[in-house]
Image: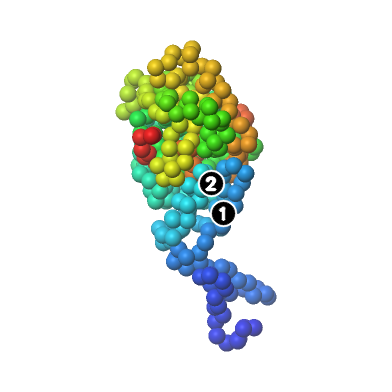
Amino acid sequence: MNCFGSRPFTRLCGRGCFLTPSTKPSSHVRFRFRFPPSGRRNLSVHPVAGSIGAEIRDVDLALLPENPGWVRQLREAFLQHQVIFFRNQNLEPQAFLTFASHFGEPVEYPFVKGIEGFPEIIRVLKQEHETVNFGGIWHSDTSYQQTPPLGSVLLGKETPPYGGDTLFANQYAAYDSLSDGLKETLAGLRGVSTSAKADASKTREDRIRDSGNPTAPAESFEAVHPVVRTHPETGKKALYVNVAHTARFEGWTEGESAPLLSFLFHHQVKPEFTCRFSWEVGSIAFWDNRCVQHNPINDYHGFRRSMLRITLAGDTPR
């Protein structure tokens, strides 16, 4: 007989959470929480900064297929906070792909081939001897494509002992803080994005050398998109230019475009629009490419940093 009587102790504690005694021998009775796969439990969402970002705590993403209600809650948090973070998610590639597939269609990255058996998952790697990190500049992923991604999901596999954080910037806030006069000017402009801008293309060189995508075209990509795009799900307006890929305005020369683009590039990443995420093994960041820019900081020379990334298919910016 235990201290609760002769019957096994199981009682309901809160909404859908069962408390059961541990099976480990001990002089004290210990308990563990077990959540049934009902999807009814509200997830724990914690904003990380005033403008953008939230960490989702106490959730095992491997159980997402058993909890369809979590998918809805995560989607809501994603749209509200623009980038959501998770800790301690040591997912294997198939589980990682399954997680991402709940929120969109995984697609191949144009310049780097996927890992073995998973063409949609690429390795974002900086090795100990390398000095340039992949994508190490403020940017919106592949805005040089006709249909840029909905979002990207990054999973930490190897992290340096310090450094290697990623910054994220809220492009709703960047747009909202502009004057009415500048908003009116930008409303009629379209930006020309290219994969060939030197500051961005050099960040891909190491990975193209060792794991380049053989199906990538020899020529660069180029696309024209509104400078201010309307988010297809929230209806909010966001700035949609970035220093890595936007070369000029449509119908303008690069020289004519430079002063206004320079202002926008500096304005859209002001500290008050940003958050900063420190990586650990098993950390995940999932960001909305339609209204977020990001910048992985290159401050860990001599150490290895390895991530797995999935890109989700998007729509044509409007």
Q: Is residue 159 above or below residue 282?
A: above
Please name the residue that numbered disc 2 is placed on.
81
Q: Nearer the viewer, residue 104 or 32?
A: 104
Q: Secondary structure at mark 2?
A: helix
Q: Residue at x 53, y 58 (%)?
A: 43
Q: Nearer the viewer, residue 288 or 23?
A: 288
Q: How is the image coloured?
A: rainbow
Please name the residue that numbered disc 1 is placed on.
45
Residue 24, image x, y percentages: 59, 71
Q: Is residue 75 above or below residue 305?
A: below
Q: Nearer the viewer, residue 202 or 81?
A: 81
Residue 317, image x, y percentages: 39, 34
- Image depth: mark 1 or mark 2 in front: 2
Query: How many numbered badges does the structure rendering display?
Result: 2
Contact, mark 1 vs mark 2 (Cβ under 8 Å):
yes
Amino acid type at mark 1: Val
Q: Is residue 202 above or below residue 179?
A: above
Q: Residues within 10 Å of mark 2 (few under 14, many from 20)?
A: many
Q: Quadrant of the C terminus?
A: top left
Q: Residue at x 55, y 21 (%)?
A: 262
Q: Residue at x 37, y 23 (%)?
A: 222
